């Protein structure tokens, strides 16, 4: 087996945890597998570094901020390599630069431009375990960059893509759930989920895997797995696959628990809509659930966004006549099989109706249906839909 | 003024101390000076990292150990650069690699092979302050190395040599003293000392400046100064110069407070001495105060070393008949003017005689006279010689 393991901050938070991971990796290596490890910074290290940066008034200088933060991963990886060697397993720690991760110059959320796999491959060929810092790379000029949210997962998938290996992301939850277990404690753990479904859920705030790393896995055909740190039984976690043999109708539900809806009437064929979106783009605001409908010669445009964004848009465009609904919530039913099943929308809307929950907007994509409801109805809607689509344990 | 400032661990131990140094540097820069800063790791950071390495059983892997330790300096420099920018002073932190410090591959005590000054000069030319990590460099393959004891001072002098600037080393003592003030509390602080004298004293354990950095300063003609952190009055510290206009006879006294003397008789013209030193070299033992004298057809060879080394030599060469004296101490009177003053030896030996202190060995160099005495007499010898040569305040 050839595999890249990624361990997040909680999984390497103490010397004891590092040792436990080293035991696991050593076990795999001695059984004849090829292993590479990607590590995050230990536990609360990143938070502490951010505190220190704020204390010197410098958290705004992105180049220095990246140089500061990158010490966290570098420390973990050096210690992990040492722990592996203490167990008789040759190991070499590699920073982003040493791993050949060349990025653009956008500090704090850099994009990987290319990976020079030479050093990593050399280490593997020598029989050693590469222990690679997550979350970082270097610019062509040698300045350290960090990759933004979920950066360590991105590193892990990128390493797997470079080596042509599988990728296993280890964290402090069992796997991906149909619905956030903090919202629905009986939510089922998914054995499999497609890349596209995962990306929809991640965009909705499902924190376990960032869209970006899943997108990379899909693009480079990396077999991706998410599971609890140190759990050896891979049926216990979630395999993220390109597609199912036969798709589930609804795999899961993503939730955004607070948003606003803005609506505006405009002339059919007029320029209101294009002006509006140009202004919104200049304000750097993200909007969602864009919906445009004709009513005779009048068009109605609506979209959802955060409450703060809604305020800002209305303040900056006082001449437009907006209608605003605050205190909404958005549910997205996600399922790769939805493309061939038209009954999902019907079933979802009937379920809401039967539970006395009115809906505001409906939008759809290839594999999702999103509906906005009043915040106060959110939990009830969630529970009702989870039951209707068999997403919870009994 | 063009100057490199170096701040050791105590001087940057906390955020407040970093801020205080940043205030000082900003003041200098705004007054129109060119400044570069070299920083050590904050306070006890290096000790903590070493502890963590030991805890994972890996402090023996030198490559990983260097990668781990280097995070200390990297952290301080990123924070210092941020603090300077918060004061309106453009600043760029640079790791050993980014500063162009290319070393050999001897981890833990690497030697600088060359410095590519391009990046540092670029930063200076842009009007910014380079904030450079002390104690580290990279190999030609990009592996991080550390430079050994006094490494940050070495970095500072090397940067000054590269830029053609002065170098000021800031620490937690006022300057260089004639004798270690912990031994002689009334020892005078030297306004000036030559490179050669400083190297003699450093070899004797005078901790403030390592031989290596002074040697570099001498080789590249760098004006070197040592003083207390944040002290602006440069008459308060010690200037390390190439030579004096007129040299002091005795500038200071270095002390090694425990050593052993081994003596052996041998045939004149025989091979005992060469065999002996070959064996000692193989054992990797340092010996000192080598003395060889003829007594008719018999020669006597003696030398001093640590008590453990003496034991080891006698155990490994059981067929040789050594005489050993343990519990000795060595005093070295150091002075650039000694080359032209033959009375120093006379004065030193009379002083010891008048104080009832017998001596074992005497050896001399161009600028020093070393004498071994019984440990028990050390303090008395020190005080008497300090008084005789006017090295203490009244």
Image (cartoon, coloured by chain):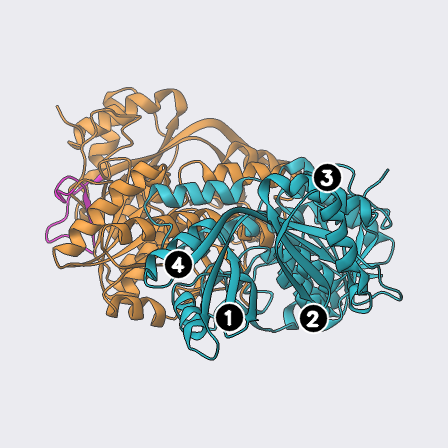
Chain colours: A cyan, B orange
Q: Nearer the viewer, mark 3 or mark 1?
A: 1
Q: Chain of mark 2?
A: A
Determine crowd level at label 4: few under 14, some 14-19, many 20+ residues with C-alpha closer than 10 A: some
Query: Where does the magenta region start and end?
Result: B232-251
For the residues beneath circles 4 and 2, the answer to whether they share a chain is yes
State which tag comes first along the sequence, 4 or 2: 2
Q: Quadrant of residue A392?
A: top right
Residue at which label 4 appears: A313
Dot 2: element: helix
**Dots 3, 1 in contact, CB < 8 A:** no
Q: Quadrant of residue A181?
A: top right
State which tag comes first along the sequence, 2 or 3: 2
Looking at this view, is A67 or A194 the one in front?
A194
Measured as percent of width and height from the top left, residue B284 is found at 57, 48
Mark-to-mark CA distance, 1 and 2: 50 Å
Residue at which label 1 appears: A299
Measured as percent of width and height from the top left, residue A342 is found at 80, 65
- Residue at x 76% of width, y 51% of height: A350
- The numbered disc on residue A162 is 2
- The numbered disc on residue A184 is 3
Left or right: B251 with respect to A104?
Answer: left
Left or right: A298 with respect to A167?
Answer: left
Q: Chain of mark 1?
A: A
């Amino acid at each position: 087996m050839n595999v890249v393991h990624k361990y997040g901050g909680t999984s390497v938070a103490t010397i004891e945890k590092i040792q436990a991971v080293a035991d696991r990796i050593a076990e795999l290596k001695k059984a004849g597998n090829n292993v590479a490890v990607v590590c995050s910074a230990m536990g609360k290290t990143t938070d502490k570094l951010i505190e220190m940066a704020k204390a010197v008034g410098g958290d705004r200088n992105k180049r220095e901020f990246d140089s500061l933060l990158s010490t966290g991963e570098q420390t973990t990886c050096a210690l992990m390599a040492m722990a592996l060697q203490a167990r008789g397993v040759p190991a070499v720690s590699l920073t982003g630069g040493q791993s050949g991760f060349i990025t653009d110059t956008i500090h704090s959320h850099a994009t990987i431009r290319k990976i020079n796999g030479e050093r990593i491959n050399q280490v593997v060929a020598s029989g050693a375990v590469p222990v690679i810092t997550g979350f970082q790379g270097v610019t062509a000029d040698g300045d350290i960059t960090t990759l933004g949210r979920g950066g360590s997962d991105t590193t892990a998938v990128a390493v797997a893509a470079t080596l042509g290996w599988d990728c296993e992301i280890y964290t402090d939850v069992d796997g991906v759930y149909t619905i956030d277990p903090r919202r629905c404690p009986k939510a089922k753990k998914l054995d499999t989920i497609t890349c596209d479904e995962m990306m929809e859920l991640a965009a909705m705030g499902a924190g376990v895997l960032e869209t970006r790393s899943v997108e990379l896995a899909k693009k480079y055909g990396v077999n991706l797995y998410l599971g609890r740190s140190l759990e050896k039984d891979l049926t216990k976690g979630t395999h993220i696959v390109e597609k199912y043999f036969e798709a589930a109708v609804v795999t899961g539900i993503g939730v955004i628990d607070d948003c606003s809806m803005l609506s505006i009437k405009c002339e059919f064929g007029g320029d209101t809509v294009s002006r509006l979106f140009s202004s919104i783009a200049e304000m750097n605001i993200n909007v969602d659930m864009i919906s445009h409908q004709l009513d005779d010669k009048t068009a109605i445009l609506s979209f959802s966004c955060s409450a703060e964004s809604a305020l800002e848009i209305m303040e900056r465009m006082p001449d437009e006549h907006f209608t605003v609904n605050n205190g909404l919530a958005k549910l997205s039913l996600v399922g790769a099989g939805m493309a061939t099943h038209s009954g999902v929308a019907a079933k979802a809307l009937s379920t809401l109706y039967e539970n006395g929950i009115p809906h505001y907007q409906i939008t759809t994509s290839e594999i999702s249906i999103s509906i906005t409801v009043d915040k106060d109805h959110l939990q009830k809607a969630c529970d009702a839909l989870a039951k209707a689509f068999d997403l919870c344990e009994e």
